[in-house]
Amino acid sequence: MAFSAIVVAVCAVVLTVKVMSTDTVTVKPVRVLDPAAVEKQVANTVGETKNGPPRVYCPVSVVVEVGAKFECRAWGNTNPETYEVKILDDQGELSIEKQ
């Protein structure tokens, strides 16, 4: 009985040492742009239209990655307009240009 307790204790120590010595993988949380904030910036770029402020739709869950581009659509007058949005830095600075 005492021998099996020693074997169990040794196995527990070996397992603990093995687990503690393995490299851990650090997972960085994914940062995404706030779609409402992006839509507001695009609306400010579009400016006031004859029908009032434009309606803007941008994709949701855009990952903050420097150089990434995506499109937003703005409706203010009769035809929708497309705007290309480019992420300039990791803080979410954007460049917005009409296509």
Image: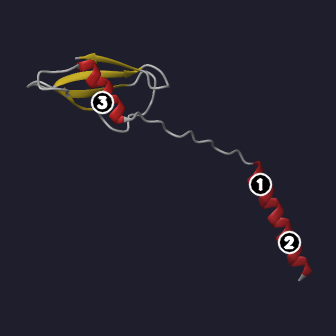
29 or 26: nearer the viewer: 29
Q: Amino acid at mark 2?
A: Val
3 or 51: nearer the viewer: 51
Q: Is residue 4 left or right of residue 42?
A: right
Determine which of the numbered discs, if any, sits on residue 39 in the image: 3
Q: CA distance from mark 3 to mark 2?
A: 64 Å
Determine which of the numbered discs, if any, sits on residue 51 in the image: none
The furthest residue to the right: 2
State the image coordinates of residue 92 (x, y, percent, origin top left).
44, 26
- Disc 2 and disc 1 in contact, CB within 8 angstroms: no
Badge 3: residue crowd in 10 Å (few <14, some 14–19, many ≥20): many
Task: Identify the image quadrant of the N terminus.
Answer: bottom right
Q: CA distance from mark 2 to mark 1?
A: 16 Å
Mark 1 sits on what residue? 18
- Disc 3 and disc 2 in contact, CB within 8 angstroms: no
Q: Amino acid at mark 1?
A: Lys
State the image coordinates of residue 34 (x, y, percent, origin top left).
39, 35
Q: Give the vertical position of 57 relative to 15 (above or below).
A: above
Mark 2 sits on what residue? 7
Q: Is residue 40 left or right of residue 99?
A: right
- Residue that appears at 77% across and 48% down: 21
State the image coordinates of residue 94 (x, y, percent, origin top left).
39, 21
Badge 2: residue crowd in 10 Å (few <14, some 14–19, many ≥20): few
The furthest residue to the bottom: 1
- Residue that appears at 91% across and 80% down: 2
